[in-house]
Amino acid sequence: MRKIFFLGLALTGFGAYFYYNRQVNLLKNMKYSIQDVKILDRSQKLWRAEITLNVKNNSDIPFTLTGWNFDLSINNEQVSKILDTKQKISVGANGGVTPLKFIVEFSPENYGLLDIVASLINTGKKTNITIDGDVSVYSGLLMSNKSPVNITWKLQDFM
């Protein structure tokens, strides 16, 4: 009788270990892509855009995004910081894609309007835009505050 008890206890431990590993691999299965960029306002004092970021879950376990912290760079110069810890967005399982929208705004005066315009003129449609940072993810027993995100795309992709 004791052997059966210890065997059951061992199998429960292995099951818990494999479940935990599966949850951790969940973070590695997330894919990010840019769906859309809309210019909302463009003046000498303020540029605003809405970026739609698609989050794809290739795992069979759903999760919730509980916050994000991104830096937006144009041609390797950071122009904006996007921080949100209040929204909770559910991402479905098995290839579920969920759009994540956020507003990016920055003052061209702070970064040298002429430098930005010159950079856009010199590189044109080849201008690199980068989102770099991390998201907080919650799923079952696992919570991660530092799941990395790094996306780079060219301006011509949205022209």
Image: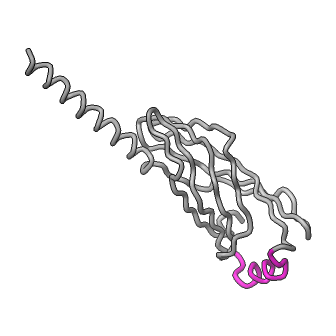
The answer to which image quadrant residue 152 occupies is bottom right
Q: Residue at x 62, y 62 (%)?
A: 131
In depth, the one of 130 and 137 nearer the eye is 137
Quadrant for the N terminus in the image: top left
Residue 5: % across, % down: 14, 19
Quadrant for the C terminus in the image: bottom right
Residue 18: % across, % down: 28, 38
How was the colour assigned to the protein in this rendering?
one colour
Q: Is residue 89 above or below residue 115?
A: above
In magenta, the rendered stretch is 111-125
The answer to which image quadrant residue 20 occupies is top left
- Is 115 part of what is drawn in magenta? yes
Which residue is outermost to the front?
Answer: 2
Q: Residue at x 64, y 70 (%)?
A: 154
The answer to which image quadrant residue 75 occupies is bottom right
Q: Is residue 23 above or below residue 116?
A: above
In the shown orientation, is residue 15 left or right of residue 143?
Answer: left
- Is 72 part of what is drawn in magenta? no
Q: Is residue 110 above or below residue 14?
A: below
Name the main secondary structure of what is drawn in magenta: helix
Residue 82: % across, % down: 70, 56
In the shown orientation, is residue 121 left or right of residue 151?
Answer: right
